[in-house]
Image: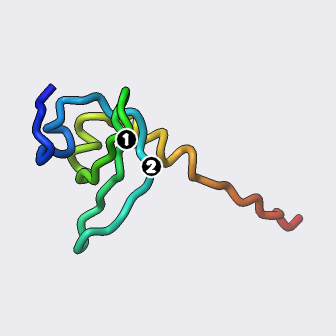
Amino acid sequence: MIDDSRVQGFERELEADKILGSADDNGKLMYLIQWKGTDAVDMVSASEANAKYPQIVIRFYEDRITWKRTKIKP
């Protein structure tokens, strides 16, 4: 593990635990990621998270998706 307080995101060489939230940074989607075994969190680009931890990104959206039932008219 790199011991430098300026290092952020995947440069920390930590494994992502979960995505806590998302934000738009000047048109670029970012995720707030919590790292396993630490309280540290970082904003990382969605494209980087999608490539390195696709299952964590999928779980983030699965946990937030809601389905609306509509009545079908006979």
Give the residue at mark 2: 20
Q: Position of residue 47 (x, y in %)?
A: 23, 50
Of 47 and 41, the residue lying toward us: 41
Q: Crowding at label 2, few (<14), some or many (≥20) Cα neighbours within 10 Å? A: few
Position of 71 compared to 52: left or right?
right
SS at badge 1: strand
Q: Identify which residue is drawn at 27% across, 43% down.
A: 49
Q: Position of residue 65 (x, y in %)?
A: 58, 52
Position of 27 compared to 38: left or right?
left
The kind of residue on which mark 2 rests is Leu
Quadrant occupied by the C terminus: bottom right
The kind of residue on which mark 1 rests is Gln
CB atoms of marks 2 and 1 within 8 Å: yes
Q: Quadrant of residue 52?
A: top left
Q: Position of residue 19 (x, y in %)?
A: 41, 45
Q: Is residue 50 above or below residue 16?
A: below
Q: Identify which residue is drawn at 13% across, 38% down.
A: 11
Give the residue at mark 1: 34
Q: Identify which residue is drawn at 57% across, 52% down.
A: 64
Q: Could you give the CA–CA distance between mark 2 and mark 1, rounded to whole angstroms?
A: 7 Å
Q: Is residue 65 above or below residue 2?
A: below
Of 4 and 29, the residue lying toward us: 4
Which mark sits nearer the N-terminus, 2 or 1?
A: 2
**According to the image, what is the colour scheme of the structure?**
rainbow
Residue pushed farthest right? 74
Quadrant occupied by the N terminus: top left
Q: Position of residue 67 (x, y in %)?
A: 67, 55
Tell me how many marks there are.
Answer: 2
Position of 50 compared to 4: left or right?
right
Q: Crowding at label 1, few (<14), some or many (≥20) Cα neighbours within 10 Å? A: many
